[in-house]
Image (spheres, helix red, strand yellow):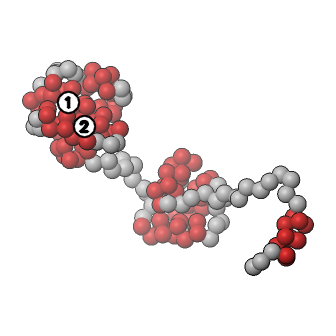
Amino acid sequence: MRYAYAELISEAEAVLQQQQRRSSKLLVFQRLQMLRLFKRGQAKSLAAAAELVGVSSRSVQTWWQLYRQQGLLGLLALTPTRQISLSAEQQQALLAEAATGSFSTINDMARWVAQQFSIHYTEVGMWRIARRLGIKKKTARPRHVQRDEEKVAAFKKVSRP
């Protein structure tokens, strides 16, 4: 069964075009492009729109469902779709533990979360949570291969404080 997508879109094509031109984010641009294709009748199905926009059919299905449920503002709101399973208190505990420097890898962090809260994450899942919480990996300051520690110590003794 084919929908009359153009009739289901309440915004005028000119309004969609204006918002698309002003958008600076690719995802917003693509979502508006999908609506414009439907509005102009260039896409007769979700699969056709996906092909024209250059995304998966599932993405277009999700966007269309979001548009039908929440309207244009809901479609353009770029909110994370994955929810963090950690409560606010657990997130604070994770931040506090990360501040002590006890994690050397993302897997160490995932193991700690599993031991403390019995919530299991993959490496990628834990990386996403760390990024959302602003936890950055520790990186060593680069040192030259031929660095001579005795010369560095001698330089520090004679140089000004």
Q: Is residue 133 visible?
A: yes
Residue 36 is tagged as: 1
Most extreme residue toward the right is: 150
- Type of amino acid under label 2: Gln
- Type of amino acid under label 1: Arg
Q: Nearer the viewer, residue 74 or 115?
A: 74
What is the quadrant of the N terminus in the image? top left
Q: Nearer the viewer, residue 157 or 141?
A: 157
Q: Which residue is mark 2?
A: 20
Would residue 62 be found to the left or right of residue 69 on screen?
right
**Secondary structure beneath label 2:** helix
Count neighbours of disc 1 (C-alpha within 10 A) and say few if under 14, some if 14 to 19, many if 20 or more.
Answer: many
Q: Say which residue appears at 22% left-offset and 21% top-offset.
A: 43
Q: Earlier in the sequence, mark 1 or mark 2?
A: 2
What is the quadrant of the C terminus in the image? bottom right
**Secondary structure beneath label 1:** helix
Alpha-carbon span between mark 1 and mark 2: 9 Å
Q: Residue 82: horizontal and vertical position, in percent?
A: 39, 49
Q: Residue 58: horizontal and vertical position, in percent?
A: 33, 31
Q: Nearer the viewer, residue 117 or 21?
A: 21
Count neighbours of disc 2 (C-alpha within 10 A) and say few if under 14, some if 14 to 19, many if 20 or more.
Answer: some
Q: Say which residue appears at 25% left-offset and 37% top-offset.
A: 21
> Is 68 situated above or below 56?
below
Contact, CB < 8 Å: mark 1 with mark 2? yes
Most extreme residue toward the bottom is: 161
> Is 18 situated above or below 140?
above
